Image (tube, rainbow, N blue to C red):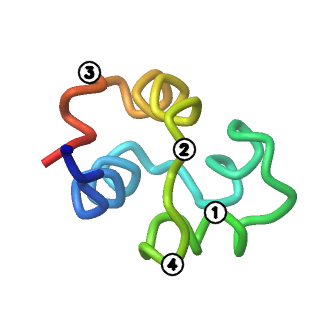
């Protein structure tokens, strides 16, 4: 099973100047700290988040996995 590439997600988010708060809002999370738990690997992204993340980061879903 492929693993989510957290380093890519963070790097790409920073390249596009997208804040954690903006990511949290797009994913329906209540706060940027909630998103931070996902990006740092303390929580796992669910499959339904992946198409949204790919759209925000302007990449393919495949790029989000190692």
Q: Is residue 6 above or below residue 61?
A: below
- Horizontal side of residue 66 vs 35, given as left or right: left
Q: Which residue lies furthest to the front in this view?
A: 1
| Residue contact between numbered discs 4 and 2, judged by CB atoms under 8 Å | no
- Label 4 Cα neighbours within 10 Å, binned few <14 / some 14-19 / many ≥20: few
Tell me how far mark 3 sits from mark 2, CA to CA: 16 Å
Q: Residue, x 26% and y 21% (percent of image)?
A: 60
Determine the residue positioned at 42% across, 73% down: 41
Position in image of residue 37 (x %, y %): 58, 74
Q: Identify the mark nearer the N-term, 1 or 3.
A: 1
In front: label 4 or label 3: 4
Label 1 crowd (10 A; few <14 / some 14-19 / many >=20): many
- Real-space CA distance between mark 4 and mark 2, rounded to the nearest whole angstrom: 13 Å
Q: Nearer the viewer, residue 62 or 7?
A: 62
Q: Marks 1 and 3: CB-CB under 8 Å?
A: no
Residue displayed at 24% across by 54% down: 5
> Which residue is denoted by mark 3 in the rendering?
60
Q: Name the residue under label 4.
A: 42
* Foreground tag (2 vs 1): 2
């Amino acid at each position: 099973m492929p693993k989510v590439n957290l380093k890519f997600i963070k790097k790409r988010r920073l390249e596009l100047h997208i804040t954690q708060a903006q990511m949290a809002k797009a994913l329906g999370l209540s706060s940027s700290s909630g998103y931070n738990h996902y990006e740092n690997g303390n929580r796992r992204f669910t499959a339904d988040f992946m198409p949204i993340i790919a759209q925000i980061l302007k990449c393919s879903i495949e790029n989000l996995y190692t």
